[in-house]
Image: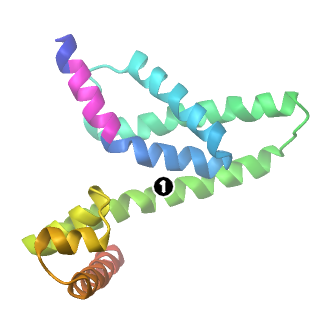
Amino acid sequence: MNQDKEKQFFRLFMQHQRAVFCYILMNVRNADDARDLMQEAAVIMWQKYSVKDPEDRFSAWAVAIARNLIKRYYQRLKRNHLIFNDDLLAEIEDRSRVHLESYEDYLVALRKCLAKLDVRQRQLLNLKYERGMKVKEISMHVRRSTEAIYKIIARTQAALLRCIQKSMAE
């Protein structure tokens, strides 16, 4: 049972980690402090995670943990005489929550739009963005000219952007 809990937690954590970190970074703005808070949040999430928790609530639960850590972070800053107005902090949190929701909508739209691409387009994007290959390396890998790869990737990116915009407008 414990191994199932670990697998489920890490699957959900990896799925939502970027969104939670973005939320923290939008509220904290200091990248080093945001990374520290993300690590602290990850530890707390692992300690408090229960397999009985509904999977569809993981993101909201993780953000709530991050929100509490951010509040403590600002309380520590206040004690160090870096004072922030509570109204300002509430405004920052509200705006970042809206951005986080639109980010998650964006990811859903991106996944749908990626699924609509043909195999060749997905392969090129995978090589470029997931494997981090340069266009010249991709061209050698797929035996096409670098110009052709640039054009295919540019067209694919444009098509993805149009698809995402259309999906989010609906």
In the depicted structure, whether residue 4 falls above or below residue 142: above
Q: Secondary structure at mark 1?
A: helix
Residue to which mark 1 is pinned? 100
Residue occupying image coordinates x 20% and y 68%: 114
Tell me, yes or no, if residue 61 can be seen here.
Answer: yes
Residue sitting nearer the eye, 128 or 16: 128
Within 10 Å of the Cα at label 1, are there few (<14), some (14-19), or many (20+) other Cα atoms? some
In which quadrant is the N terminus drawn?
Answer: top left
Q: Residue furthest right?
A: 81
Residue 159 found in image quarter:
bottom left
Segment tinted magenta in the rendering: 5-14
Q: Is residue 7 magenta?
A: yes
Q: Residue furthest left?
A: 119
Q: Provide the major secondary structure of the magenta segment.
A: helix
Amino acid of disc 1: Leu
Residue occupying image coordinates x 28% and y 73%: 136
Residue sitting nearer the eye, 80 or 122: 122
Residue 127 found in image quarter:
bottom left
Tell me, yes or no, if residue 113 can be seen here.
Answer: no
Q: Measuring from the top left, give residue 55's x and y in whole percent.
A: 26, 35
Residue occupying image coordinates x 21% and y 25%: 7
Q: Measuring from the top left, give residue 71's x and y in whole percent.
A: 68, 34
**Lateral position of residue 73 relative to residue 77, left or right:** left
Residue sitting nearer the eye, 83 or 36: 36
**Lateral position of residue 148 relative to residue 69, left or right:** left
Q: Is residue 151 magenta?
A: no
Residue occupying image coordinates x 47% and y 43%: 20
Residue sitting nearer the eye, 115 or 94: 115
Q: Measuring from the top left, give residue 34's x and y in whole percent.
A: 60, 40
In which quadrant is the C terminus drawn?
Answer: bottom left
**Lateral position of residue 137 relative to residue 122, left or right:** right
